[in-house]
Image (spheres, grey):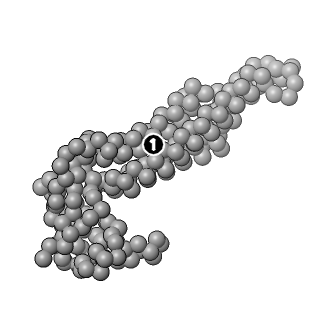
Amino acid sequence: MQICAECGQAFDGDQCLGCVPRKAGVDKTVFWSFVAALAGMILTSFAQDLYPPLGWDPPARSLDLTFFALTFALVMLHDRLAQYITFVRAMCVLASAATLILAAFFFLNGALDEHPPVEADALVSTKYVSRRYAERVLVLSIAWNQRRIEETLSVSRETFSVVEPGDSVRVVVHPGAFSTPWYGKSIDKLD
C-alpha cells in the first residue's frame, strides 16, 4: 500500500484512484473554459468592430490577458490544484463567462440601440498610416457629453487624404442601448 501525496489516502497500483478523476476534471474544465474564453475574445473583437465603443481603452484586452495568464497557471499547476477542484472550476467558469458577457454587452449595446445618432464635433490631433496593418488612422479629440474624449479611428483613403491635423470634423455618435456610446464609420469635414 502506498500513501497518496496529494490527498493522503492509501492506494494500490500506480495511481491514486481518488486523484485521477479530479485531475481529469481539472483538465476538462480548463479546456472548455479556454475554448469559451477564446470564443468570447473573438466575439468581443467582432462586436467592437461592428459597434466601436467611444472612449473605451481596451480593458477587454486586459481581461483576456488575465484569463490567458490564469489558464496558463492552471495548466502548469493542475497537479497541485486538483484537490481544490470546486474552486478551480468556479474560477475558470467565471473567468470564461466574463469574456462571453463582455462580448454580449458590446454587441447588444449597439444592436439594441434605438436612440437617434448625434453628430459630435471633433478636432483632428494627428493622422498616420499604421505600419502594422497599413490602415489610415486619425486621432481625434471628440466633444461628447460635456467632456473631450481622445479616440483613434481607422478611416477610408478618401477621408484620410482630405483631412489634416487641426481640422474640425463631425463624427456620428450613437448613445448606446446601455449608455455606452459608440461611433459610426462616417466622418464629415467641416468647412
Q: Can residue 123 be seen from the camera position used here? A: no
Structural crowding at the residue carrying mark 1, measured as other residues with C-alpha within 10 Å and reported as few (<14), some (14–19) or many (≥20): many
Compare residues 138 and 77 and report the one nearer the observer: 138
Q: Position of residue 125 (x, y in %)?
A: 24, 73
Q: Position of residue 126 (x, y in %)?
A: 27, 76
What residue is at 73 percent from the left and 21 percent from the top? 18
Tell me the quadrant of the picture where the N terminus can be found.
Answer: top right
Q: Is residue 139 above or below residue 32?
A: below
Q: Quadrant of residue 92 in the image?
A: top right
Tell me: 92 left or right of 62: right
Task: Identify the residue position indicated by label 1 in the image.
Answer: 99
Q: Is residue 73 above or below residue 19?
A: below
Q: Quadrant of residue 163 in the image?
A: bottom left
Q: Can residue 31 be seen from the camera position used here? A: yes
What residue is at 14 percent from the left and 53 percent from the top? 145
Q: Is residue 18 above or below residue 41?
A: above
Tell me: 97 left or right of 171: right
Q: Position of residue 135 (x, y in %)?
A: 41, 72
Tell me: 6 left or right of 104: right
Amino acid tagged 1:
Thr
Tell me the quadrant of the picture where the C terminus can be found.
Answer: bottom left
What residue is at 21 percent from the left and 48 percent from the top? 175
